[in-house]
């Protein structure tokens, strides 16, 4: 009897858990409109270390129909932390327009998506690429935030803050 109750409880738990999941993927895709697509792709691949995994285009008419833009085509480049189906997508696109707001100096300067956090295996190789590309580390030197965990803060070419966390 005890085994039957445990089995029923387990089945109900699994069914309840499945019923509560509304998502078919566990990763989030984030679309980022940038001023200069090539400059941003270079930053995210050659400095941060993301990989280009694909892309797609959406015609102006379909963009209008879908409510994405009012008069632009979209050419989207997909970057990921690793080339796997499960990895989150960092989707870059440019409309050839300038930003309508000033570049933030601090996360508190605006609302909306302000930063991403990347947890890395080793911080130093990324810091070396940041220095080689004359990118300012806003946090100064990496700060220790835990046992063998360090934090560095930079901004991408459009001002999105990037927290880099990991061992040196």
Image (cartoon, rainbow, N blue to C red):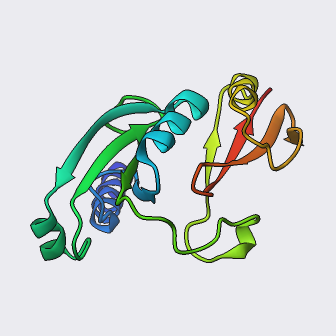
Quarter in which the N terminus is drawn? bottom left
Quarter in which the C terminus is drawn? top right
Quarter assignment of residue 135: top right
147 to the left or right of 45: right
Quarter assignment of residue 143: top right
100 to the left or right of 53: right
In the image, 83 versus 43, the foreground residue is 43
List x then y, in percent, for residue 66. Answer: 17, 73
Residue 89 in view (yes/no): no
In the image, 49 versus 117, the foreground residue is 49
12 to the left or right of 155: left
Residue at left 70%, top 22%?
A: 125
List x then y, in percent, for residue 88. Answer: 41, 45
Residue at left 36%, top 39%?
A: 86
| Total marks in image | 0
List x then y, in percent, for residue 87. Answer: 40, 39
The answer to whether residue 83 is above or below residue 30 is: above
The answer to whether residue 30 is above or below residue 50 is: below
In the image, 105 versus 85, the foreground residue is 105
37 to the left or right of 122: left
Residue at left 22%, top 76%?
A: 67
Residue 110 in view (yes/no): yes
Quarter assignment of residue 112: bottom right
Residue at left 15%, top 65%?
A: 60
List x then y, in percent, for residue 165. Answer: 72, 40
In the image, 121 versus 138, the foreground residue is 138
């Amino acid at each position: 009897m005890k085994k039957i109750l445990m089995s029923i409880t387990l089945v109900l738990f699994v069914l309840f858990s499945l019923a509560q999941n509304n998502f078919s993927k566990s990763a989030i895709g984030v679309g980022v409109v940038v001023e200069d697509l090539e400059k941003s792709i270079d930053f995210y691949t050659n400095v941060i270390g993301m990989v280009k995994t694909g892309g797609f285009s959406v015609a102006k008419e379909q963009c209008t129909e879908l409510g994405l833009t009012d008069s632009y085509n979209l050419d989207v480049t997909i970057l990921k932390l690793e080339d796997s189906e499960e990895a989150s997508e960092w989707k870059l696109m440019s409309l050839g327009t300038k930003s309508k707001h000033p570049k933030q100096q601090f996360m508190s300067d605006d609302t909306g998506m302000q930063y991403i956090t990347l947890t890395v295996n080793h911080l130093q190789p990324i810091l070396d690429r940041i220095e080689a590309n004359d990118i300012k580390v806003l946090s100064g030197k990496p700060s220790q935030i835990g046992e063998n965990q360090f934090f560095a803060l930079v901004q991408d070419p459009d001002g999105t803050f990037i927290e880099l966390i990991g061992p040196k």
